[in-house]
Amino acid sequence: MTDRQNPSNEQLLSLFERMTLIRLMEERLRADSAAGKLPGAVHLYIGQEAVAVGVCANLRDSDWIASTHRGHGHFLAKGGDPKAMMAEIWGKRTGICKGMGGSMHVADLSKGILGANGIVGGGFAIATGAALSAKLSGNGRIAVAFFGDGAANQGVFMECLNVSTLWQLPLVFVCEYNHFCEFTPTATVTAGEIADRARAFKIPCEVVDGNDVMAVWSAAAKAVAWARSGKGPAFVEAQTYRIQGHLESEDLFLAGGKYREKKEIDEWRKLDPISRFGQSLLSKGVCTTGTLDSISTKIAGVVEDAVKFAEASEPADPELTFDVMFAGQKP
Amino acid sequence: MPRKRYIQAINEALFEEMERDPKVIVFGEDVELAIFGDTRGLLERFGRDRIRNTPICEATLAGMAVGAAITGYRVVFHMMFSNFIYTGFDAIANQMAKLRLMTGGQIELPITVIAGYGGGRSTAAQHSDTPHPLLMNLGGLNVLVPATPADAKGLLKEAIRGKNPSFFLEASGRGGDSGEVPDGDYTVPFGKAAIARAGNDVTVVAVGSMLKPALSAAEKLQSAGIGVEVIDPRTLVPLDAETIVRSVRKTGRAVIVDEARDRCSAASHIAAIVADKAFSSLKGPVKRVTVPDVSMPYAPNAESRVLPSENQIAQVATDLVHSKQFA
C-alpha cells in the first residue's frame, strides 16, 4: 500500500468528463453504425468507461498502453484526440492512422498508445516488450496491458506473467472482466479465477468493482506505483459488464440466437459507472447538477465536432497503403 | 581477403553492430551459451541487459520484439530453428508484419529475427523446415537468405541497422562452410542479387542453401560444354527480379533451385516472374528443383532422396539445354 493523495475536486470532475467523452463518442458510433455510415464493425466500450479512465488517470503521457479490439475507451482515456479517432473509424485520411487501421487499431504513439489490437491477447507481449524497453532505458516509464477476460485464456497471458515477473518489468496487467468472450459467457469457458493466475506468480493483485471509477483509480494508483518503483508487474482485475454486443450489428448474423438475457443487461445498467459517479459527486458536494450538465453539454459539442470533422474529411489515400507497408522501402 | 566460416561471419556482424549502437539488444532461447556459435562471446562483452536467455515462449518473444522495437530498441531475436517461427507465428504474422501499416506509418520496426533452416543433418521434420515462402507471403517482412559468409555478415548488418522487420535465415547445414569475408565495416544492400558464376546457356537461380550444389553442378556442366549462369538472389523480399530476368533473356533457359517444398515455394514465385517477364526469350519450360511436397524424413538416405542435389540440378539443366521441344 502506497501513500497517495486523494484526487482534487478538479481531478474528480476531469474523471467524470473523460468517462462522459467515451460514453458519448460510443453512443454516437452506435447510432452511426446502425445507420450504416461506418465502413467497418465497431466494438463498443459502453459500461466499461470507469476502467480505462480510472487506470489512465494514473499514467503519464510517456507511459505506454496496449489496448484491445474494444479500444476506443483506452485511446480517449490516454489522451487520444477524439477527432482523429472518429476520422479513423470513418476511414478518412485525417484519421489517427490515416484510415489504414480503423476502429480495432486506433493508435497514437505520441501519446504512448501502442494501439488497439484486433487479435484477442495481442497486446500482452507488446506491452511486455515496451516494459522491457522501459526497464533497460531506466527512463521511469511503465507499460499497461489492458485485456479482457476472454484474452486471459490465451497462452501468452501466462507467458507474459512469467517473463515480466522473472525480469521485474514495470508492467501493469489490467483485466477488464466484462463477462463475455465474444458471444460466449466467460464462466462457461474459464476454469478458476483469472486473478489467481497472477497470484500464482506472487504478483500483487487487486480485484475491484470496475463500475466504480474511484475503486479502479485507487487500485491502479497502487499498481502503477508498484510497477514504477521497479518491483515488477502488478495486476488489477476490474469487474464490469459489456452492455453492448460483442460488436454492433451482431443481431444481423446471430439470427435470433441469444447468449444472454435482457434482464441481466438491465441489472447491470443500474450499476452504470457514469451515473453512479455523478451521484457520488453530488452527494459529496463536489459539484452541482448544473456542473455535470454543463460537462455533458460541452462533451456533446466535442463529439459533434468530431463527427463533422470526420464527415468533411477526404477519404483515405489508397496509395498510402504502398507507402507505409515498409519504412523507406517499396512493398 | 581472410577466409571465415559462415557462423563466424554472423558472430562478427552481431559483435560489430552491438559495439556500434547501444540500442541493439539480442534475446532468445540459449543465446548466452551460443549453441549455434553465432552469439558466442556477446554476453561476456555486452552483459545481460543486452543479450539474455529467455523462457521458451516464442509467441510472447515475437510480440516483445515488436513492443521493444516500437519503443526505441533495435531488437535481434534469435529463434534458433526456423520451425519455431511457427510457435511464434501469431505475433509475427499479425503484429510484426502489419503494425506499421495499421498505424498509418507511425512506427518503425527495427527487428532482426535469426533462425536456422533446412535439412541434411537428420534433425527430422520439426527442425528442418524452410519457412521462407510463408514469410514472403506476409508482405511486411524482409526475407534474407545469405549463402556465403560475406553476404551473411553484410546482410545481417544491413538488417540490424534497418527500419523494418527482417528474417535472417541461416542455412543450418552451412555454418562450417568458409569463404572470403571483406575486412572492415560493410553492408550488403537488400534486393541486389549476385551473379555467382557467369554463363550463356542456362540460368540457375539458387536460393540460400542451394547455392553450393548449384555451383558444383555448374562446374560439372562446364566440362560437358554447358555454360551455367548461377544467380544468388541473396534476399527474397525484396527480390531482385531484374537481374534474374536479364540473365534468362540472355540464356533463354531457367532452372530455379530452392530447398522449400515445391508448392508455393520461392522457386514457383520466381518461375512465375520469369515466365511473365522473359517469355519471348525462353527456349524451353521454366524448371524448378525443389523439395517434394513431403515433410523431411529423419534417415540420412531418406533425406537425400528429397533434398535437391548437385546431380539433380545438373540433370535438369542438361535436359533443358538439350530439349528440342521449343527449339
Image (cartoon, rainbow, N blue to C red):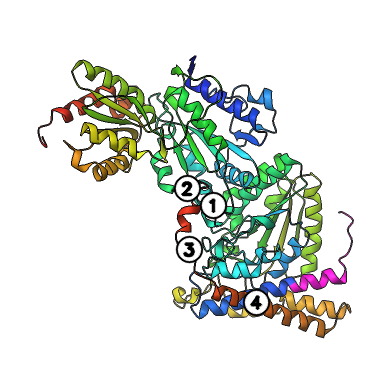
Provide the residue span drawn in magenta: A1-17
Asked if labels 1 and 4 touch by Cβ distance under 8 angstroms, the answer is no
| Vertical side of B86 occupied by B256: above or below | above
Q: Which mark is residue B140?
A: 2
Q: Amino acid at mark 3?
A: Asp
In what element is the residue under mark 1?
A: helix
Q: Return the residue at label 1.
A: B100
Q: Quadrant of residue B208?
A: top left
Q: Residues within 10 Å of mark 2 (few under 14, many from 20)?
A: many
How far apart marks 3 and 2 lie (CA) works out to 19 Å
Which quarter of the figure has residue A21?
bottom right
Q: Residue at x 44, y 26 (%)?
A: B172
The answer to which quarter of the image holds residue A80 is bottom right
Q: For marks 3 and 1, give the one nearer the viewer.
A: 3
State which tag comes first along the sequence, 2 or 1: 1
Q: Position of residue B37 (x, y in %)?
A: 55, 22
Give SS at disc 3: loop
Chain letter for the residue marked with disc 2 in the picture = B
Residues beneath discs 3 and 2 located on the same chain: no
Residue A303 - label? 4
Q: Quadrant of the C terminus of chain B?
A: top left
Q: Is residue B211 left or right of residue A19?
A: left
Label 4 neighbourhood size at 10 Å, few (<14), some (14-19), many (20+)? many
User: Which residue has dot 3 on it?
Assistant: A317
Give the amino acid type for the residue marked by disc 2 in the picture. Answer: Gly
Q: In this rendering, do the residues under marks 2 and 1 share a single chain?
A: yes
